[in-house]
């Protein structure tokens, strides 16, 4: 189940990263970036529970 | 100082609020024809300033006797990330033809930046792991704030993507650092305090 959640969250990260550059500059894009970053924190917590390196990349892209 | 760490807004409220402000005109389609290199350089330079201070802070903390054998590998890894952030920001600034800001050289400059944002953590006098990590958390918040600001304002896609990725990385760092000093598993609200990562501006 945790593995499934991890893959879903990773897919969500990838989707956010594809979508954010398509947004106009402004508070919505900033908010999307802030939520992307929060999702990255979630993925990291799942990785910790799965006994994996928590934050293996300096630039998060959902493929860690 | 504006802190976005209060976390009192839900994600829905944050997004609905911003969409209402912008009238829903958030989807751009193609990148704007007139990229603002000067503006982008200013945003990236601000982030670079805080990232360089963050590198100084990590180097200073890693030299402290108070750093435990458990904390040391983690802090060393995060320092590697911060150095990678610095490198990419320098590359993006150079790609814009912008000069690089003068690099900080003293840990006291970290304290100056924290003090300027009304933060009470003190890097240079930190003796315990908890105090040292709090200083790292605070400088991390300033990095997050610079990235959050840049994420809303950058006009070029490539640095935008890197900034967003680095914001996420800083958010992860904040969680890992918080877990070092808030070790009770019930402290998850300390580890991930908000529904979004926007740091301090």
Image: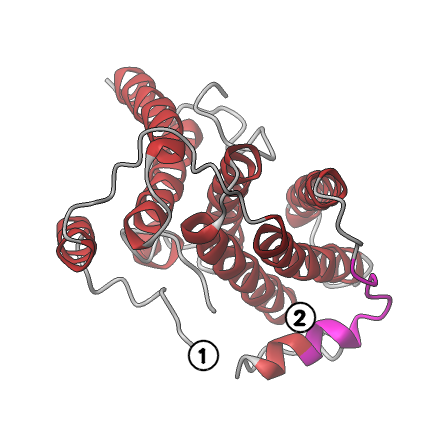
Instruction: Check the picture and name the quadrant holding the N terminus of chain B.
Output: bottom left
Question: In the displayed structure, does residue B98 sit left or right of residue B158?
Answer: right
Identify the residue position indicated by label 2 in the image.
Answer: B128
Q: Whole-percent x and y of residue B155?
A: 49, 44
Q: Whole-percent x and y of residue B46?
A: 63, 61
Identify the residue position indicated by label 1 in the image.
Answer: B1
Question: In the displayed structure, does residue A48 sit left or right of residue B54?
Answer: left
Q: Quadrant of residue B76?
A: top right
Q: Quadrant of residue A38?
A: top left
| Depth order, front residue of B86/B55 | B86
- Which segment did they paint magenta? B101-112
- Number of other residues with Cα within 10 Å of mark 2, as a class: few under 14, some 14 to 19, many 20 or more: some
Against B59, residue B129 (above or below) is below
Q: CA distance from mark 1 to mark 2?
A: 27 Å
Identify which residue is drawn at 41% across, 51% down. Answer: B152
Q: Secondary structure at mark 2?
A: loop
Identify which residue is drawn at 52% across, 41% down. Answer: B169
Which is nearer the N-term, disc 1 or disc 2?
A: 1
């Amino acid at each position: 189940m945790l593995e499934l959640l991890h893959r879903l969250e990773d897919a969500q990260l990838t989707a956010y990263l594809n979508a954010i550059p398509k947004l106009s500059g402004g508070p919505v894009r900033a908010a999307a970036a802030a939520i992307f970053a929060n999702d990255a924190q979630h993925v990291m917590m799942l990785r910790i529970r799965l006994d994996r390196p928590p934050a293996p990349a300096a630039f998060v892209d959902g493929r860690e | 100082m504006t802190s976005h760490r209060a976390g009192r807004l839900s994600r829905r409220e944050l997004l609905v609020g911003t969409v209402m402000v912008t009238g829903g005109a958030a989807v751009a389609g193609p990148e704007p024809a007139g990229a603002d290199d000067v503006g982008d350089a200013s945003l990236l330079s601000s982030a670079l300033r805080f990232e360089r201070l963050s590198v100084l802070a990590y180097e200073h903390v890693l030299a402290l006797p108070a750093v435990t054998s458990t904390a040391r590998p983690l802090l060393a890894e995060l320092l590697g990330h911060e150095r990678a952030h610095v490198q990419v920001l320098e590359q993006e600034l150079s790609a814009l033809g912008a000069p690089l800001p003068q690099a900080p050289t003293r840990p006291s400059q970290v304290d100056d930046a924290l003090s300027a944002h009304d933060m009470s953590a003190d890097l240079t006098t930190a003796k315990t792991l908890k105090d040292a990590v709090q200083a790292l958390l605070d400088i991390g918040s300033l990095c997050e704030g610079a990235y959050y600001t840049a994420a809303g304002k950058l006009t070029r896609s490539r640095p935008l993507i890197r900034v967003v990725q680095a914001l996420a990385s800083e958010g992860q760092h904040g969680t890992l650092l918080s877990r070092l000093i808030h070790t009770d598993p019930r402290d998850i609200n300390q580890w991930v305090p908000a529904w979004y990562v926007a740091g301090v501006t």
